[in-house]
Amino acid sequence: MSEHRRKPPESQGGGRAAARRAAQQPSGRRAAPARDSVTGSPSGSYGDQRPAGGRAEARRAAQRGGRRRAAEPGGGGPAGPGGRRGGTGPGKKRFIDYPRFNKSGWRRWMPSWKLVSGLCLGFLGTLVIAIGIAYWMVSVPNVAQAAQAENNVYYWADGSQMVATGGEVNRQIIAYEKIPAAMRYAVISAENKTFETDSGVDPQGIARALVNMAKGGHTQGGSTITQQYVKNARLDDQSQTLTRKFKELFISIKVGATKKKSEIMAGYLNTAYYGRGAYGLQAAARTYYSKDAKDLDPSQCAFLASLLKGATYFDPAGATEIDPAATPEQNTKNAMNRWAWILDEEVKDGHLTAADRAKYKTFPMPDKPKKNAQLSGQIGYLVSLSKAYFVNNNTQGISASDLDQGGYEIHTTFDKKKVQALEGVVKKVRKDNIDPKKRPEKDTFVQFGAASVDTKSGAIKAIYGGEDATKHFTNNADQTGAQVGSTFKPFVLAAAMEYGKRDPRKPADQPQEDRTPVSPKSIYSGMNNLKIKNYDGTVWTDKDGGQWRQTNDGNESYNPPSYAIDLRYAMQESANTPYVQLGMDVGTDKVRDVALAAGLRKESLASSSVPSFSIGTSSPSAIRMAGAYATFATSGMHHDAYSVEKVMRRGSVIYKHEDKATRAFPAAVADNVTDVLKNVVEKGTGTNAQLSGRDVAGKTGTTDGNRSAWFVGYTPQLSTAVSMYRLDDNETNKKREFLKMFGTGGQKKIHGASFPSTIWHDYMEQALNGVPAVDFPTPEEVGDKVYGGGMSPSPSPSSSPSDSPSPSGSPSPTPSLTPSPTPKPSKSCGKWDWNCGGPGGGPGGPGGSDAGTDQGTTVGDTSGPTGSPSPSKSKPGSGNQGNIFGGPTG
């Protein structure tokens, strides 16, 4: 047979079985060719046939073919362009090999070391370029420009200028050669021991500051002298932000690299703030020691260096307008400790010999503060009050030293006409009645304080802080420590109506779900020398077992022989015994809660662990009392007292007051308290405060020993508190003691119904002139008529003498905590004399002599060099209440 007629041999393992196997291959793969199938074109020569290799060879051929197709553009079938289903990587290796070429599984997504290294180098290069640009763009501070003084301008509520102050500060620049070496060494030892060798920045300190700011904490100053100098010199930007911190960092680096250490030290000392409005060492030397900087000795230098940690807590003159804890006594202690520490550090650092250190054993007490004549009269009190409010309430971290740098516009709430009217009225009362020459033992050290608050907003419209802010440094409207006496009773009544009388059948340690709300019609005993009981009927005793017998003013007993009077009449006549017992029935802790809700500060409240708490052993400020009574005027809505509407700088508003009204207690409770206090003015001890054609509510108050007297009252529009007391507030007086006022002003005894109510009346007549009269809301019924302190309803009870005159024929406005003699055994008992005889009778302990005055405050630490003394803040003790704007949150 001829060659071309011969049939090609069949491939082994081919035929129909091979075809079936090919058909079973997945769609993404072609069947392997049979061993004897041709590899070329079907029309090709038979000589190109591929020898057969069995099934294994067919599979290998199929796999090789799949890889070749995957590498072809568009190959891979359903897996999409560039790869097959479940492929191992892109078809072509890219410049940035991610996801990685020719890798599968987790290795495909693991970046190579080349990629990681490249990214790091790129980031570092970009960072270096950015730092270089930032370094090039920032400029070194100009000391001369930083030394320029700027005024702070204060405005009245109507927008007119009150006073421009701050620019009078002496910021004279002195050369490095005129700065005593002792001052430089004191600062280096106290602030930055490595100043001579460091680069000007402290990375760890910067990190701490940034982390603290990111957490929302207080901002921190520079850790090195260079950084502090940069911060002080940047008067154009007083914001406390991360942006500013970064700018200061680059400026500090540039200053450290381009300036000599002598220039940096001189710049720092010429721009640092030393307190009392003094910027720069020369100003500080003149302010504190009335000498030039070059004449300062090492001891004085050490003291001035201590002020750089914070003059608020190291100036012996004190700064209670900023923080009530910064008293002259505590600040002097702080200053002496740090002064001594700095001198000792100088010895350790080799800047002062031990022999020279031994010469300075006595603290170099600085001069007393010099007052600006512009701040005389009431202006100084108004400026201090608004300054303190802004410093303690702004959210940008602007400190007192920042504010003292000037350039701020402070728009206050003070009404110029009302301030003038209040000052004029107090001056008239003082001139007509107080005569220290005529009655030196009775009329010396007499002080008045007052505050007037808008009831609808809490805006402080007027204050009276004292005779002259340049002579009398304590603001009597804000911080005095004078106890408020019976003006505290409305909070007891409010607590009784809101929380109710406790169930005497339940132990004190169990919940009191079954309290009975108390109505002003409730009956209590008006008996003098009343033995006070716990809510469960047991006799109250102190920790030593002493009983408490409460007296009334003038030792009066009301409505004998039953002594049963309602709470409305007891408030009208300012009877103490019903309200002390009411406080025990309700719980003095609830009375405390109501007082705080109304706006009093926690640190101004006395201990609530004794019965006398209910009749005013606490010492809130006049501002706080006016604000708290305003809460009654607004049917229980509390608006916190404030003195600054807005603050501007460089044309921008950096602070604006926001009213955050809160409900202190239900409207029915507040309106009933108002109705009871309205009765006090119409029929009781406050009749002297009546205003023609207007609704007035108010309360008189006098304290134990006649050491203070108050009248606090309000109309629907305005609430005003007036205090009077005797206190030697001279700075040289170590013993701060309130003096008795028997015989003061020619009167036998000073009551709230006398001079304080006269001042209140005369001021309010002027302040409300032209203002439409508004009536108080009609109160709804609240509470039940209860019989407190163990009293029981009488089958034929004596009518409550609410409309009858006072038994004594004269007002009795004051609480007295003076112990009264225990009734003699032979004394007869009235039919309703529930306290005569029986269990717990007999001689009682002193009444009111154990008034608690725990008024501690929590203070924080201040930042400073590690190991250096930090200022400690004293607890306001007896006679020292909290500043209205002091501390965290006012």
Image (tube, grey):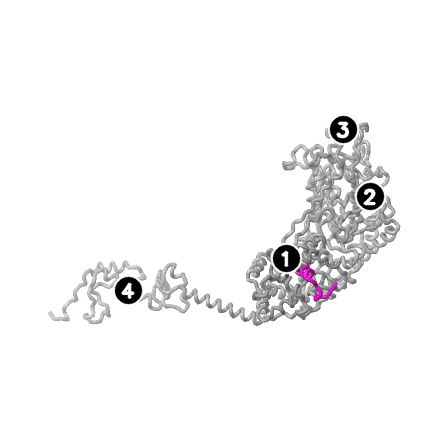
Q: Amino acid at mark 1?
A: Asp
Q: Which residues are magenta?
A: 290-305
Q: Which mark is first along the chain, 1 or 2? A: 1
Q: On the picture, is 40 further left or further right than 712? A: left
Q: Which residue is mark 4?
A: 64
Q: Nearer the viewer, residue 485 or 226?
A: 226
Crowding near pointer 1: few (<14 within 10 Å), some, many (20+)? some
Q: Residue at x 73, y 55 (%)?
A: 459
Q: Amino acid at mark 2?
A: Thr
CB atoms of marks 3 and 4 within 8 Å: no
> Circle 2 sits in a helix, a strand or a loop, which is it?
loop
Viewer-side label of 4, 1: 1
Residue 709 point in image, percent of width and height: 80, 46
Q: Which residue is mark 1?
A: 344
Q: Which mark is first along the chain, 4 or 3? A: 4
Q: Which mark is first along the chain, 3 or 2? A: 2
Q: Which residue is mark 2?
A: 685
Q: Amino acid at mark 4?
A: Arg
